[in-house]
Image (cartoon, rainbow, N blue to C red):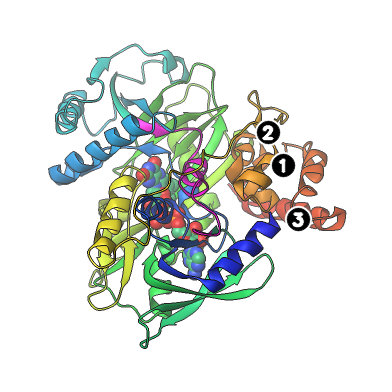
Amino acid sequence: MLERRAACRKAIAQSVFDVAVIGGGINGATVYAELCRRGYRTLLAERGDFAGGSSQSTAMWVWGGLLYLSTLDFSTVVKLCASRDRLIDELPAWVRPAPNRLLVTPESRNGAWFLNFALWLYWGLGGFRRRMPLQQSEFPERRLFRDGHIANTLLYEEGSIVPSDTRFIARWILPWSGPDRPALNYCEVAGGCRDAADGQWRIELRDRVTGEETVARARWVVNAAGVWTDQLNERFGIETAWKHVFGKGVFIVLPRDPCHDTSLTLENRLDDFYSLIPWGPVALWGPTETVSPDPESGFVAEAGDVRMLLEELNRHLARPVGPEDIVALRCGVRPLAVKRSYRSDRYTLGISRRHVVARDAQLPWISLYGGKLSSCLSLGAEVADTIGLALAPAQRGAEAPRAAASQNGTERFPGLEQPVTSVGSAVKAEWCLTLEDYLRRRTNIAQWVPRHGLGRRGEHVERLAVMAEQFPGVDGVRGARALAAYETRVEREFDHVLAAV
Ligand SMILES: Cc1cc2nc3c(=O)[nH]c(=O)nc-3n(C[C@H](O)[C@H](O)[C@H](O)COP(=O)(O)OP(=O)(O)OC[C@H]3O[C@@H](n4cnc5c(N)ncnc54)[C@H](O)[C@@H]3O)c2cc1C
């Protein structure tokens, strides 16, 4: 594993790449895969773990943009529905049709008639390809709610990612990655500039595992750094007509009731909707939508977020839930694209979630703003088409990617019915470098097992201690240190937050 990284670094130092993609979230991953597919010599640098930014906290919905009906943005709905249905058709093992049930309560702002009309319109704009919307008064999850509280329900269909957003992102990167097309996690772009003599970008890379520094050369750069896009542009002296504002989103993760199989969506008191989304042994409730002044502060859930989510859920439930029921917290920051002149700290819900591919007028540099799981295929194609106008691929036909990393090395984790990818397999085939990568992104242990995998009373700590020693370059002492750091983080970002609710 460490040898493979060294081989990639050596190749990076000796090559001139067609394109360097910065950021390994959904945008960077799909752009990288599409460029590789078209024969471009491409480098991907991700400063943390793949999918370690906003893309690890999604609702895993591949949706057609129902929200845009409220602003009469029909063309976006048509496009997003087409992207959603293409993903469902082309990647059936990863994106499945997923029913969603809108629950209408006596306090609902929108009546069943209005919501039904909106869903039929949505279905039509989606080319009638998904399941026809249905009004139903009876549904299997009814017993979760207070007697007489649900007046009506409306069932319609979207898409959903399985088994997780993070594995979906790795799926775009891992099959293509190798010394010819290196994709490195824990590889930070620290700075760089364009050499006027040869017109190539010099990109300073810092390997966060070994501390080694390498300079990569590339003809084009795609800045896919998500909420950090503007910071990175500034470092390279790039100015665009766009910028990001940051919409913080939090879910609480609760045990899933056995009768709960379908996503359930309810109006909240903030002119928005929250959903209870079944996911393996748990259910996600949320997400919130609040403005974050900067990217960093939005990545940690606070007591106020959790309190609001619990209050909203308990308005409806027959058996109220409390902080002691929460299995894990899930929090991220949405990169929302706005014009640079945008001046407002208003509620971010009204801001479009569409993506913008901003090509610099003079320099071979593309900045990505916004974006969604649903539109990942069209985003990849749009970027590759833009580059294709100026640069032909180095290779002609694209080589077929290796089969996605096999999951044949599995192991059991207490409390989970399904086996999980083993640490050995994740290290060998999935570039997994740390305990946190493994628990949070290569498996769902950190979201499915209480206290982010530690167990309610820390009963899994010993098991995690054994796992922590199996990572490359880690001995007993380093393994213990990695585990202690993980425990400290869970205490700070979970235990203390819930204690303050
Ligand atoms: C709570 C919540 C729920 C959501 N649910 C959905 C949903 O259900 N469906 C949907 O379609 N969308 C959803 N979204 C939106 C979606 O998560 C984001 O739009 C998407 O993940 C953004 O992807 P990205 O690749 O732009 O950013 P990221 O995933 O953040 O990727 C950017 C990457 O760039 C890296 N980076 C930054 N600077 C550097 C550097 N200097 N060097 C190297 N790497 C760098 C970062 O480490 C990061 O990993 C949700 C968002 C939130 C917050």
Q: Amino acid at mark 3?
A: Ala
Please, what secondary structure does the residue beneath circle 1 have? Answer: helix
Q: In the picture, which quadrant includes the N terminus?
A: bottom right
Residue 367 bears which disc, if any? Answer: none
Report the residue at 47% width, 52% height from top: 332
How far apart are the two marked residues, 2 and 1, measured between alpha carbons? Answer: 7 Å
Q: Amino acid at mark 2?
A: Gly
Magenta residue span: 159-182
Q: Is residue 219 above or below residue 371?
A: below
Report the residue at 16% width, 24% height from top: 113
Label 3: which residue? Answer: 482
Q: Residues within 10 Å of mark 1 (few under 14, many from 20)?
A: some
Label 2: which residue? Answer: 409
Figure label count = 3
How far apart are the two marked residues, 2 and 3, measured between alpha carbons? Answer: 23 Å
N-terminal label among 2 and 3: 2
Q: Nearer the viewer, residue 116 or 54?
A: 54
What is the residue that sits farthest to the front in this orientation?
Answer: 396
Label 1: which residue? Answer: 424
List x then y, in percent, for residue 232.
Answer: 43, 73
CB under 8 Å between discs 2 and 3: no
